[in-house]
Amino acid sequence: MNKFIAGGCLLLSVLTLSCNSGTREKGETGKTISIERSTFSQEQVKPLYAEGFKLTYADRYILADIQDPQNEESATFHYAFVERGAKPTGIPADYTVIELPIRSVICMTSLQLSNFIKLGALDKVVGITSTRHLFNKEMNEHLKEGKTAKIGIEGNFDNEVIMSMNPNLILVSPFKRGGYETLKDVGIPLIPHLGYKETTPLGQAEWIKFIGLLLGVEKESNERFVAIEKKYNELKELTADGKVKKRPIVFSGELRGGNWYAVGGKSFLAQLFKDAGADYFLKDDERSGGVTLDFETVYNQADDADYWRIVNSFPGTFSYEALKEQDPRYADFRAFREKGIIYCNMKNTPFYESMPTEPEIVLADLLHIFHPDLLPDHEPVYYSRLK
């Protein structure tokens, strides 16, 4: 696996879907037409929104190309998925062969874990990293019973524990520093899960299909996603094409160590706000990743914004007064003065553990705040307006 991990940080890029046929037949016109079929089931996985993985179906294997959706110049990482015990021919030499369905896996992030929770497949997760914000009762029981092990944290992974669990593969988040260089030596396949790099909510959620493929439950994962997609697009339509009279302006983040960390206008968060009928304060910024700003720059662009989105792990009860105590300048924002803060406390809410596979619920939360007349009976799940 050395060729897939370098310097503890993987570089990946964007591809779109392309499917080859497993068999070919003659059509009525005499032309050869493709008859699609899955290598492992009667149902294929076809990403429609996710740009971080591409799947190409061949006769007895599937080629998977994984890349960073935010960087077209980065490297591609190649895997060939084959049925367990099969030895198909024709697989390109630069593709690492992985037998499916997998029977056990280690998850490095809550976002990865969210896919297994949604698919009811936590029995396949034999190792996780931090349990700081772990809410899921089933996974906590597995930890108590020893079915799932804690493998340490970034930069200090316990390779002995990892090897003792002997998973079929480890899902990694390659852009986080620390520890991945040593994971190469355990001899277990590493596969990047890049849902967190997708720039749209449905693109992030669609990685459930990729996990479904690994688990051999393509039909179930496709059905799960179709339900998510249908509800999300129905809610999105409520604010489309000028259907709302006013699109409020919203900004996000807090000061950390003297810097204000936000994301660009082509990011997941900016798209989520747009779909909820609001305008992100950096909507014209062309970046899709993180943006570091100073307080003055944020204030100049967001002093008159209607809403301020904050996600943190505040000990105790978070309030406007508690926020002002952190920095008195916060009180100068209009969103502070007019009680327009959108808040999620990760100490009380399984934000990263469940949110990635429930974008329709997140969208409903925001719609309820931005345009309360559209969803008057909605009960907030992740985001609510700070009282």
Image (cartoon, rainbow, N blue to C red):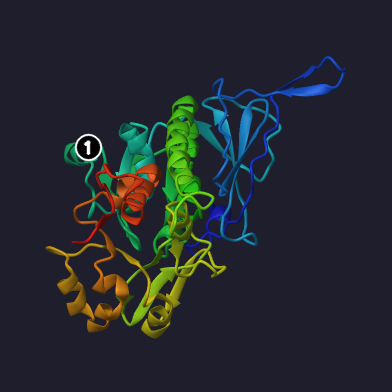
Residue at 36% x, 82% y is: 295
- The amino acid sitting under disc 1 is His
Question: Left of 11 or right of it: where is 116?
Answer: left
Question: Left of 220 or right of it: where is 373?
Answer: left
The front one of 309 and 148 is: 309
Helix, strand or loop under label 1: helix
Residue reaching furthest front? 245
**As drawn, 61 above or below 260:** above
Question: Is residue 192 among the parts visible in the rendering?
Answer: no
Q: Quadrant of residue 11?
A: bottom right
Q: Which residue is mark 1?
A: 142
Percent of width and height locating residue 345:
23, 58
Residue reaching furthest left? 316
**As drawn, 18 above or below 384:** above
The front one of 169 and 387 is: 387
Percent of width and height locating residue 113:
35, 44
Question: Is residue 9 among the parts visible in the rendering?
Answer: yes
Q: Quadrant of residue 334?
A: bottom left
**As drawn, 383 above or below 119:** below
Question: Callout 1: few (<14), some (14-19), or many (20+) C-alpha neighbours within 10 Å?
Answer: some
Residue at 16% x, 72% y is: 322
The front one of 351 and 322 is: 322
Residue at 31% x, 35% y is: 122
Residue reaching furthest bottom? 296
The front one of 338 and 115 is: 338
Q: Quadrant of residue 32?
A: top right
Question: Left of 117 or right of it: where is 236?
Answer: right
